[in-house]
Image: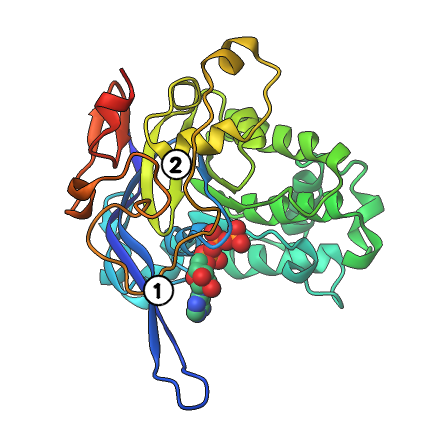
Amino acid sequence: MKKVVELKNINMAFEQKGKFLQRERHIHVLRDVNLDIYAGEIVAVVGESGCGKTTLGRIITGILRPTTGEVLVEGENIYKFDIKKFFRTREKVQFIQQDSYAALNPVKTIAASLRAPIKYHYRHKTYLQIETQIKELLVKVGLNPPAQFLSKYPHMLSGGQRQRILMARAISLDPALIVADEPVSMIDVSMRRSILNLMSELNQSDNISFVYITHDLATARYIAQNGRIVVMYLGEIVEEGKIDEVIANPCHPYTQALIATVPTPDPKIARIKKEIPIKSMDLGSLENRDEGCVFFDRCPYASSECKAKIDYLKIGDTKVKCIKAKELNK
Ligand SMILES: Nc1ncnc2c1ncn2[C@@H]1O[C@H](COP(=O)(O)OP(=O)(O)OP(=O)(O)O)[C@@H](O)[C@H]1O
Ligand SMILES: [Mg+2]
C-alpha cells in the first residue's frame, strides 16, 4: 500500500528558558518516533495530555521541523526540497486545530477565509470558478445552502459549523492527508458524532487519510473502526496496531490501564478488561529521562530489566514497546 507520510526516528526537543537564576532546560517531547501513514487509512493517536500528540501532528504536517529525524511525504524527504517544492508538498498534508475560533480570522467572512488559500494555490482559476468551488465545498461539509454562510463571520457560527469550515478549507487544496487535532473536544457533545461522520465520509469519498488526535478512546474507536491506533506515552509510541485488536487485547500496561478506565457497553470487552494497579497517578516528567521504559515509574510490572533500552515486540499485528508484553499477554 502507498505511504503518504513516513516519520523516521523523529526526536523533538524544546528549549525552555530558565526563570530567574535557573538554567535553560531542554525538554525532550518526542523520542525515536517512527510512524507510517498509508493512503486512505484512518489512524487515531491517543494519549494523555502533554504526551506530545499535538507536537507529533505539527511535525507530520511540516509546521514544525523536528530536532532530528526525517519526514517523508510520498517517499521524499521534505526538508531536502527547495522552498517552493516544500510549500507545494505541504498542501498535501493539512492540519486542523482544536480551537476553530482561533483558526479563523475573526474579521474575515467565511467566503474570504475559504477564498484565500484557493486563490493562492490555484492561480489559474477564474473568479467564477473559485466562487463555485467555495459553494461546492460548503455543501460537501454539510453547510447547506451555502449562500447562508458565505457572508457570515466566524463568531456568528456555532463551534460545530466552524469546525466544518476548517474541514472545507483543508479539503479545498485536495490533500492526501488531514491531521485533525482534537477536532471535537471543544464542541457540543450532540454535534460530535456528525463531525466524526463528516471525516469518515471524506475518507470514503475522496480517499483522504486522517490522523485523528484525541485523548478520548471512545471517539477514536468510533472514527477509526477499521483503522489503526497509535498509543503515546510521554513522547513515545508505546503501542501501535489495528484498533479493534488493540482495544480487545491491549499489550502494553499503559494501554491496558487506559482501556480499563473507559466504561464500555460492550460485554465482550468488559469481560476481558482488567484493572491495572498503576503505581502513581502522576504523569512522569519529560526532562532527564533515562534510556529505559518510559512507563517505568508507574508500571506495576516494572523490574530492573526494564531500565535497559527497549525495542518493539510484535504480537500479531501489534507493535508494542514493552519487554514483558508477551508474558503479560498469555
Ligand atoms: N513550542 C514549545 N516550546 C516548549 N515546549 C513545548 C512547545 N510545544 C509543546 N511543548 C511542550 O511539549 C509537551 C507536549 O506538548 P503537546 O502539546 O504536544 O502535548 P499534547 O499531547 O498535545 O497535550 P494536550 O492533550 O494537552 O493537547 C508539553 O510538555 C508542552 O509543554
Ligand atoms: Mg494537544
Query: Local crowd at mark 2 within 10 Å, few (<14), some, or many (≥20)?
Result: many
In the picture of the structure, the residue carrying the numbered disc 2 is: 254
Query: Local crowd at mark 1 within 10 Å, few (<14), some, or many (≥20)?
Result: few
Quarter residue 117 falls in: bottom right
In the image, farthest residue toward the top: 268
Quarter residue 63 falls in: bottom left
In whole angstroms, how far apart are the C-alphas of marks 1 and 2?
42 Å
310 on left or right of 6: left
Question: Nearer the N terminus, badge 1 or badge 2?
Answer: 1
Relative vertical location of residue 143 with respect to residue 234 in this rendering, above or below: above
211 on left or right of 154: left
Q: Residue at x 23, y 49 (%)?
A: 76
- Residue 180 image point, x, y percent: 53, 44
User: The disc labelled 1 sits on which kind of residue?
Assistant: Lys
State yes or no: Cβ of the residue under disc 1 lies below 8 Å from any atom of ligand 1: no
- Of discs 1 and 2, which sits in the foreground? 2
In the picture of the structure, the residue carrying the numbered disc 1 is: 84
Quarter residue 248 falls in: top left
- Residue 145 image point, x, y percent: 81, 37
In the image, farthest residue toward the bottom: 21
